[in-house]
Image (cartoon, rainbow, N blue to C red):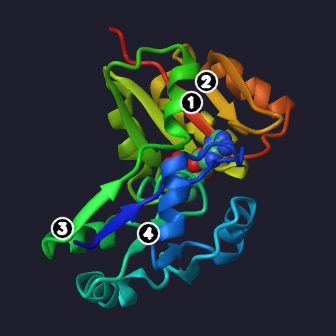
Amino acid sequence: MSKLYLIPTPIGNLEDITYRAVRILKEVDVILAEDTRNTKKLLNHYGISTRMESHHKFNEYRKVTEIVQRIKSGEKVALVSDAGTPAISDPGYLLIKECIKENIGVECLPGATALIPALVSSGFPGDRFCFEGFLPHKKGRKARISGLAQEKRTIILYESPHRLLKTLHDLQQVIGNERMCTVSRELTKVFEETIRGNLSALTVHFSQHAPRGEMVIVISANKE
Ligand code: SAM
């Protein structure tokens, strides 16, 4: 019975992929990739010659019905994103939902994602946490941040380097200066680092050291 495989790919270090992921990428008929040029580097590294097709946020709506039909007629399909686990702040949700609706098996392999190493490295409790992905840039941003102020679980946010300072500043305005946070950048890469401190200290740090690379913000829970 054919199914959809969701395959996590490295978030930096090419060694962070499982043996099973490599085997499945070799065995499927087609790999749906967010950016085929990017995934090509990974496939070359592991000697995988499977055909690729692009599947990204601009064509997923258009392609989803066709892909579901192809899986139903026996095609073996794997979905990868540029980095980490598909459907985690990346394309995939739509196809997964449609496959489930059509009684197609969906199997997500465990593997690389940025939120878990950032959470664990933060040193904040990892038994209960909430992942908020990217904050909205405009509409709903204030309400979302206000909602986080009272959150009793550790909070994880994704952010881009050029918006980090604005986000730290906005968080500070609502949550206050003292809440402890971490920013993990360049996870699994040569210049990986985790900066720890309260919101005020982190804002000062990144005002003096321009934010570079990919980053995850982790905010400790409201303990009041
Ligand atoms: N699907 C991915 C995952 O499973 O983590 C997330 C993709 S999302 C488009 C990209 C965001 O993930 C970045 O803006 C950053 O917040 C985070 N990220 C990805 N790779 C990272 C890395 N090596 N170090 C720190 N953050 C990373």
- Tell me how far mark 2 sits from mark 4, CA to CA: 34 Å
- Tell me how far mark 3 sits from mark 1, CA to CA: 30 Å
Callout 1 secondary element: helix
**Mark 1: C-beta under 8 Å from nearest atom of ligand 1:** yes
Q: Say what amino acid the circle numbered 3 marks.
A: Ile
Q: Are marks 3 and 1 in contact (CB under 8 Å)?
A: no
- Which residue sits at x=47%, y=34%? 156
Q: Are marks 4 and 3 in contact (CB under 8 Å)?
A: no
Q: Of the two numbered discs 4 and 3 on the same chain, state the one appearing first in sequence.
A: 4
**Where is residue 187 drawn, in percent x and y?**
68, 36
Q: Quadrant of residue 64?
A: bottom left
- Tell me how far mark 4 sits from mark 1, CA to CA: 26 Å
- Which residue sits at x=31%, y=22%? 128
Give left or right: position of 44 versus 145: right
Q: Say what amino acid the circle numbered 2 marks.
A: Thr
Q: Say what amino acid the circle numbered 4 marks.
A: Ala
**Residue occupied by mark 1:** 118
**Residue occupied by mark 3:** 100
Callout 3 secondary element: helix
Q: Are marks 2 and 1 in contact (CB under 8 Å)?
A: yes
Local crowd at mark 4 within 10 Å, few (<14), some, or many (≥20)?
many
